[in-house]
Image (cartoon, rainbow, N blue to C red):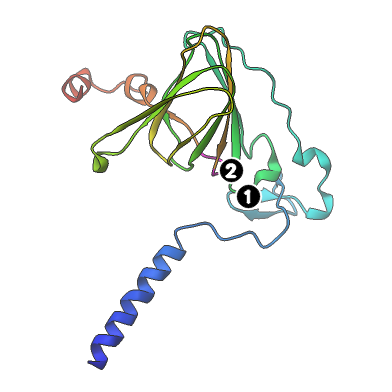
Amino acid sequence: MKGLVMISLFALLALASSVASAYDPSPLQDFCVALNNAKLAVFVNGEFCKDPKLAEAEDFFYHVMPGNTSNPLGSKVTLVTVKEIPRLNTLGISLARVHFAPYGLNPPHTHPRGTELLIIIEGTLLVGFVASNQNDNRLFTKVLKKGDVFVFPISQIHFQLNVGHDNAIAIAGLSSQNPRVITIANPLFKSNPLISPEVLTKAF
């Protein structure tokens, strides 16, 4: 009986440690401003950090310009990650401002390292995401209007389409300082070198 209790306790501790290590640890300093120069800097969370005593207001600031939607998709995504605001290093957050022309599309894509929380600032968007194979590839869609919020779970393929006659704007918060973007069509049909047509034909 004692051996069974010890095995159960060991299994519980192993499970707890695997859950605890699944997330980034909390930062142990107020801020860690990323910089490109490695001299006299500390490497933290994928970036070199400036001495906190040398930080200045500009390290915490970035201006997002209106997006140019005169392209075939009719949309422009402007990311604000650790590359644009060095102070985001270690904070686990970033954002994107998305501009849509009438009927503009932010095509199916995924963020492998971040959940997205989208709020509509202007216009009307049809949004949706597709769950994984494990969840029968279910499609979740909704039409959103000004002030509406929608969540795209981490790594799920999702999209936004302006279904209104006017321009639309949305702001997306992402749960990573560098969530990355994989636009689904690009790696499939624009890879270098190209994927064999035989593979793509059979897959689709």
The quarter of the displayed image where residue 18 is located: bottom left
In x, y percent, where is residue 37? 71, 44
Q: Residue at x 35, y 75 (%)?
A: 12
Residue at horizontal 60 percent and vertical 35 percent from the top: 95
Choose between 187 and 110: the one closer to the eye.
110
Q: Position of residue 181 (x, y in %)?
A: 47, 32
Q: Is residue 102 left or right of residue 154?
A: right
Instruction: Return the disc, 2 or 1, that comes first in the chain's sequence.
Output: 1
Which amino acid lies under the numbered mark 2 shown in the image of this protein? Gln
Amino acid on which the number 1 mark rests in the picture: Leu
* Residue 108 figure quarter: top left
Magenta stretch in the rendered image: 175-179
Q: In this view of the protein, can residue 35 be seen by the observer?
A: no
Q: Give the class, few, some or many, for how many residues have Cα within 10 Å of label 2's Cα (few <14, many ≥20).
A: many
Crowding at dot 1, Cα within 10 Å, few <14 / some 14-19 / many 20+, comes out as some
Instruction: Give the answer, above or below, for where 91 lies relative to 116.
Output: below
- Judging from the image, what secondary structure is the residue with disc 2 in? loop
* Residue that label 2 marks: 177
